[in-house]
Image (spheres, grey):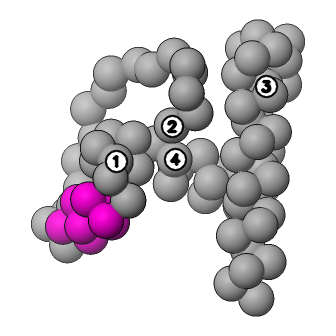
């Protein structure tokens, strides 16, 4: 999660293996499962072409955060080869 970004509570279902992996990954990074899943979802959405949300849709601070996520996702992809 980007510091200062608004959150919204939702209900999501995971299969047991996906949840266990998310819990381990979040713990390894010192994040809550919610924060880890939020970050993973944002990066995957950007990686697969959903792109950042434009400023007019959600406001300038969120758009800047999306740009930071896009940059992070691109760096991750470059590092992965």
C-alpha span from label 1 to label 3: 23 Å
Q: Residue at x 55, y 19 (%)?
A: 4
Mark nearer the N terminus (4 vs 3): 4
- The question of residue 22 being in magenta is answered with yes
**Residue that badge 2 annotates:** 1
| Residue 31: numbered disc | 1
Q: Is residue 57 visible?
A: no
Quarter of the rendering containing residue 22: bottom left
Mark nearer the N terminus (1 vs 3): 1
Q: Residue at x 32, y 53 (%)?
A: 30
Q: Are marks 1 and 2 in contact (CB under 8 Å)?
A: yes
Is label 4 in a helix, a strand or a loop? helix
C-alpha span from label 1 to label 4: 10 Å
Rendering coords of residue 62 (x, y %): 71, 22
Is label 2 in a helix, a strand or a loop? loop
Q: Is residue 61 above or below residue 67?
A: above
**Residue that badge 3 annotates:** 63
Q: Residues within 10 Å of mark 3 (few under 14, many from 20)?
A: some
Rendering coords of residue 24 (x, y %): 24, 67
Q: Residues within 10 Å of mark 4 (few under 14, many from 20)?
A: some
**Residue that badge 4 annotates:** 39
Mark nearer the N terminus (1 vs 2): 2
C-alpha span from label 1 to label 2: 9 Å
Mark nearer the N terminus (3 vs 2): 2
Q: Is residue 14 above or below residue 76?
A: above
The magenta span reads 20-28
């Amino acid at each position: 999660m980007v510091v200062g970004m608004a959150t919204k509570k939702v209900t999501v279902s995971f299969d047991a293996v996906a949840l266990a992996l998310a819990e381990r990954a979040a713990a390894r990074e010192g994040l809550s499962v919610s924060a880890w899943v939020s970050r993973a979802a944002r990066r995957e959405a950007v990686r697969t072409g959903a792109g950042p949300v434009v400023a007019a849709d959600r406001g300038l601070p969120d758009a800047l955060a999306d740009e930071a996520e896009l940059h992070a996702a691109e760096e991750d992809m470059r590092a992965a080869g």
